[in-house]
Image (tube, grey):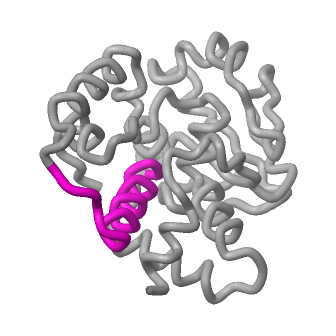
Amino acid sequence: MQIGPRYKKARRLGAPVFTKTQTQKFALRSEAKAKNTKGRRGNKSEFGRQMLEKQKARYSYGVSAGQFSKYVKGALQTTGDNAKNLLNTLESRLDNVVLRAGFAVSRSAARQMVSHGHIVVNGKKVTVPSYSVEVGDKITIREGSKNKVIFSKLDESLKTIKVPAWLVINPETKDIKIEGIPAVDATELLFDVKSVLEFFTR
């Protein structure tokens, strides 16, 4: 997905939705920007706020507008908690799992790892970043890719990464096992899921 200038977009959204903007330097710049623009604009309408939250969610997971819309519609058509349905779909993406497991330093890097054929699911190479994993799936690095530069710091990364409870990582074999349904703490999200759903059901 083509994104464009990430710092500019993140400042407009008011959230560090890209890896490169999740730094103290960006936080300081954003704070200064907010002070300079305070009072120039009126309060956003409810529609505008919902649109902003939708954009935050889309950029947080690095998906296109069309793909995100498809995910939301699927979540709304599935029984149960719509918010959990949506987050489950987003978190189950293969590129997201690779990122959550600490195999990649950014979402774009995780997407590249998958699309370049470095990731294997249940013994089969998968090159589609949006591939949806399921409970019981085993994700590994393709044997011929293990010595690639992109994995040179993986051992170090696995020592410090905070892995979600629904993933189990074997640091020796570099395997990822999907042990449960993805669960996300709402306080860790950079967007309001309720507002996103309201945007699509207004």
Q: Is residue 31 left or right of residue 104?
A: left
198 or 134: which is nearer to us?
A: 198
Residue 177 against residue 32 in the figure, above or below = below
Q: Residue at x 57, y 46 (%)?
A: 189
Q: Nearer the viewer, residue 197 or 178?
A: 197
Residue range (magenta): 41-61
Question: Who's the residue at 42% across and 59% down the image?
Answer: 53
Is 20 displayed left or right of 11 in the figure?
Answer: right
Pick the front one: 167 or 42:
42
Image spot of residue 51 (x, y percent): 34, 67
Residue 93 is left or right of residue 16, and the answer is right
Task: Using the rendered view, name the quadrant where residue 170 is placed.
Answer: top right
Where is residue 25 shown, x and y percent of the image? 32, 15
Residue for point 67% across, 34% down: 101
The relative height of residue 20 versus residue 115 in the rendered view (above or below) is above
Q: Residue 172: x percent and y percent? A: 80, 20
Q: Is residue 44 magenta?
A: yes
What secondary structure do most residues of the magenta stretch adopt?
Answer: helix
Image quarter in which the N terminus is found: bottom left
Q: Is residue 43 above or below residue 146?
A: below
For the residue pair 190 and 162, the one nearer the viewer reads as 190
Q: Which residue shows up at 68% across the image and 22% down it?
A: 161
Image quarter of the C terminus: bottom left
Tell me if residue 32 is in the magenta stretch: no
